[in-house]
């Protein structure tokens, strides 16, 4: 897969990795080790293996350390100076970074969900139908990540993405437009939020 949808428009991977890991004692999730490498590297690899040719990574907390310790070669690395305001600011920064790149869709994933692999990314990409698309992975019918937004939605998302809600308000307002793609058979949608969740890392 090349990251191109049925109409030939490129879909970029957009990885949100700016959080400080407050509930992990201030350990940035991007630098947690998983399968022998930083979690942010693993997440980039998932996007590429799933079919995203272009990958943008949004950093915030410990950005300099992450650049130094993680191999993000081939990625566009986006610094979000407003990362303390929450995921919404990182989503806005990431979508803004795609302007002028030729990307007509953004497949958004989170760095702290290592149970979501290339199979889920590929399924969501396969449902892309152009700039008006909104496609979301679902787990037993419940919407989760990754979520693909066609470019026609970017301005609306940027206008409503605030705090840690990300695109939730926009998605709630456009629920009828969302194509749900069941991924519960190929992925697990847990988050690495607390020390107890570290058991999921390998």
Image (spheres, rainbow, N blue to C red):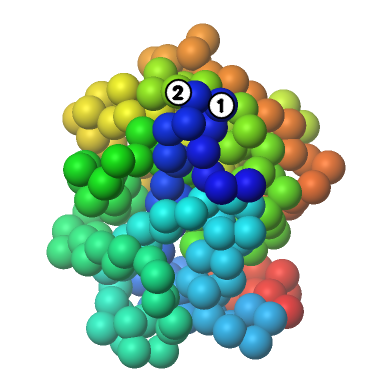
Query: Residue 130 shows which numbered tag?
Result: 2
Residue 16: horizontal and vertical position, in percent?
40, 57
At horizontal 67% and vertical 54% (from top left) the residue drawn is 118
Image label count: 2
Query: Residue 162 shows which numbered tag?
Result: none
Asked whether residue 174 is in view, the answer is yes
Who is closer to the viewer here, 134 or 90?
Answer: 134
Would you name the residue on which mark 1 appears? 6
At horizontal 68% and vertical 38% (from top left) the residue drawn is 123
Residue 42: horizontal and vertical position, in percent?
58, 71
Image quadrant where residue 124 sits: top right
In the shown orientation, is residue 125 left or right of residue 98? right
Residue 144: horizontal and vertical position, in percent?
59, 38
Image quadrant where residue 27 sits: bottom left
**Disc 2 to disc 1, C-alpha distance:** 8 Å
Rendered position, 198 above or below 182: below
> What is the residue that sits farthest to the front in this orientation?
8
Mark 1 Cα within 10 Å, few/some/many (few <14, many 20+)? few
Who is closer to the viewer here, 11 or 155?
Answer: 11
């Amino acid at each position: 897969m090349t990251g191109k949808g049925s109409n030939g428009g490129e879909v970029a991977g957009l990885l949100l990795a700016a959080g400080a890991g407050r509930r992990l004692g201030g350990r940035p999730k991007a630098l947690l080790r998983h399968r022998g490498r930083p979690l942010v590297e693993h997440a980039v690899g998932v996007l590429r293996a799933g079919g995203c040719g272009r990958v943008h990574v949004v950093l915030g907390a410990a950005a300099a350390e992450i650049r130094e310790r993680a191999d993000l070669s081939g990625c566009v690395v986006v610094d979000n100076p407003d990362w303390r305001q929450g995921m919404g600011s990182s989503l806005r920064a990431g979508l803004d970074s795609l302007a002028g790149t030729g990307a007509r869709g953004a497949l958004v994933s989170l760095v702290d969900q290592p149970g979501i692999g290339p199979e889920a990314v590929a399924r969501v990409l396969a449902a892309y139908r152009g700039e008006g698309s909104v496609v979301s992975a679902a787990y037993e019918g419940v919407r989760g990540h990754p979520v693909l937004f066609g470019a026609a939605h970017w301005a609306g998302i940027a206008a409503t993405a605030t705090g840690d809600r990300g695109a939730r308000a926009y998605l709630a307002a456009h629920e009828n437009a969302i194509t749900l793609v069941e991924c519960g058979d190929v992925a697990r949608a847990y988050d690495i939020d607390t020390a107890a969740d570290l058991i999921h890392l390998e």
